[in-house]
Image (cartoon, rainbow, N blue to C red):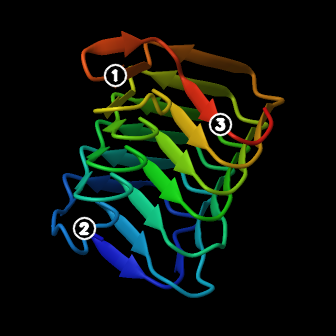
Amino acid sequence: GGALAVYTLELNQNESVLFENNQATSTSSGYGGAIYAVYGNGSVTMNGNGSVTFKDNVSATNGGAIYMSTYEPLELCDNGNVSFTGNSTKDGGGAICTNGAIILKGNESVTFSDNSATQGGAIYSNGDLELSDNGSVVFSGNKSIDTTNFYGGALKAYENVNIHNNDSVLFEKNLEKSGNEYRLRCIYFFGSV
């Protein structure tokens, strides 16, 4: 992790949480531009904060902002504004890449904008993805750029994607590129939506 490599992380009840311009650029261990939750039973929770912002973080492999190799959930719940903007990686999940579930619930707003990756421009999830009971949810301008396949301009998910009970949900201008061909497609998944 460019800023933190942890087994378990709890960032709860803070006025604001900001990770900006962090880099994990080693080709062999460049996981999580800001946070890398390493093997084990560790979890990452960011709950009850005034705001949570990940901006312009970069990783060489997975998770431009956050990478979790553990199978425990990533929870961002009951925060003010949650924003992932301009994060990037050369592999999976421009903002977030996890093996476990991702839960974004009860936040005032959730925004993923201008993140980029080879697979899952904003999110690459091997577990369930839940976006529920939030104010606005926005995926805008995220990009998945691969040389041979299309892999979700906004999301790539291998399990269930549950988006419900939010005030509003907007997917706009998320892009997939394979070779010289572009598509406006936002979700690539194997589970259910």
Q: Considering only order in the chain, which callout, 3 or 1, is on the residue closer to the N terminus? A: 1
Q: Residues within 10 Å of mark 2 (few under 14, many from 20)?
A: many
State which mark lies toward you, 2 or 1: 1
Residue at 44% in and 54% down? 16
Q: Badge 1 is on which residue?
A: 177
Callout count: 3
Give the residue displayed 44% in from the left and 19% down from the top: 174
Q: Earlier in the sequence, mark 2 or mark 1?
A: 2
Q: Is residue 133 left or right of residue 182?
A: right
Labelled disc at residue 30: 2
Circles 1 and 3 in contact, beta carbons < 8 Å = no
In the rendered structure, the answer to whether residue 138 lies left or right of residue 190 reads left
- Residue 33 in picture, x, y percent from top left: 28, 59
The residue most toward the left is: 26
Give the class, few, some or many, for how many residues have Cα within 10 Å of label 3's Cα (few <14, many ≥20): some
Residue 164 locus on image (x, y percent): 82, 31
| Relative depth, front residue between 129 and 177 | 177
The amino acid type, in three-letter code, at marker 3 is Phe
Give coordinates of residue 8: x percent, y percent: 54, 82
Establish if 182 lies above or below 128.
above
- Where 193 falls versus 1 (above or below)? above
Q: CA distance from mark 1 to mark 3?
A: 17 Å
The residue where tag 3 is placed is 189
Q: Amino acid at mark 1?
A: Lys
In this rendering, the answer to whether 82 lies above or below 150 is: below
Front residue of 62 and 96? 62
Q: Quadrant of the N terminus?
A: bottom left
Report helix, strand or loop for mark 2. Answer: loop
Q: Residue furthest front?
A: 148
* Residue at 35% over, 35% down: 115
